[in-house]
């Protein structure tokens, strides 16, 4: 009996579910890292890195199948946003490895990907051809930069909320750095 190969749609779904499973496994490891320390933090970061690779493979496969950068519908945009959030998390862990970074940022990538995979109807997940207005080289440059900035903003906002919650019982002196602020 010959082995049936995955269709492009099945492969994209499998990559998305694999990334989702890895992020779902990384979530308790991220929270465990708050108490257990370095070992759990490394495990969480490794799982997020592998999930990030699966998301990158999903996006590349979708790009190859459609012939255009994969941000033309909500499903593709949310998968790219999830990739951007997990990539930002990995960059932050490389620059400043704090145990609370994965605990605050892993749920963002997981939630975004879970919404894209399970809440969106299949009609919104299907790959479609581009409308004529989007058939431009600006799609790759403009939309990818905007979506990457949304991913960084999402992670930065979560970290800011985490800092506010961690310091909620302390008086915070806010000092401006602009001229004339005293």
Image (cartoon, rainbow, N blue to C red):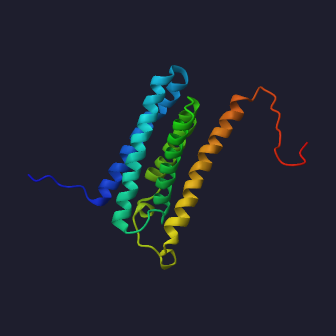
Decide which of 42, 81 is in the foreground and name it. 42
Does residue 104 appear left or right of residue 170 in this picture?
Answer: left
Measured as percent of width and height from the top left, residue 65 is found at: 34, 65
Residue at the far bottom in the pictured view = 132
Based on the displayed image, in which of its 4 quarters is residue 99 positioned?
top right
Residue at the far top in the pictured view = 36
Q: Residue at x 40, y 56 (%)?
A: 59
Measured as percent of width and height from the top left, residue 48 is found at: 44, 39
Q: Residue at x 52, y 42 (%)?
A: 91
Q: Residue at x 53, y 35 (%)?
A: 102
Q: How many marks?
A: 0
Is 50 rendered above or below residue 1?
above
Decide which of 13, 175 is in the foreground and name it. 175
Is 162 rendered above or below residue 124?
above
Measured as percent of width and height from the top left, residue 110 is found at: 49, 43
Is 41 rendered above or below residue 118?
above
Measured as percent of width and height from the top left, residue 77 is found at: 50, 59
Does residue 84 appear left or right of residue 21 in this picture?
Answer: right
Say if residue 101 shows up in the picture.
yes
Say if residue 107 shows up in the picture.
no
Locate the C terminus and report the quarter of the image it occupies: top right
Residue at the far left in the pictured view = 1
């Amino acid at each position: 009996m010959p082995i049936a190969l995955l269709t492009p749609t099945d492969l994209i779904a499998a990559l998305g579910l694999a990334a989702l499973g890895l992020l779902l496994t990384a979530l308790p490891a991220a929270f465990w890292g708050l108490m257990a320390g370095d070992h759990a933090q490394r495990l969480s970061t490794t799982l997020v890195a592998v999930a990030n690779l699966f998301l990158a493979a999903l996006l590349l496969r979708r790009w190859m199948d459609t012939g255009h950068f994969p941000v033309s519908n909500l499903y593709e945009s949310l998968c790219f946003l999830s990739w951007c959030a997990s990539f930002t998390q990995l960059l932050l862990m490389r620059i400043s490895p704090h145990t609370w970074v994965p605990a605050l940022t892993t749920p963002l990538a997981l939630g975004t990907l879970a919404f894209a995979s399970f809440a969106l109807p299949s009609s919104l997940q299907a790959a479609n051809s581009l409308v004529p207005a989007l058939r431009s080289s600006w799609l790759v440059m403009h939309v990818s930069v905007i979506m990457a900035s949304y991913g960084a903003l999402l992670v930065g906002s979560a970290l800011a909320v985490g800092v506010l919650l961690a310091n909620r019982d302390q008086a915070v002196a806010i000092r401006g750095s602009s001229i004339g602020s005293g």
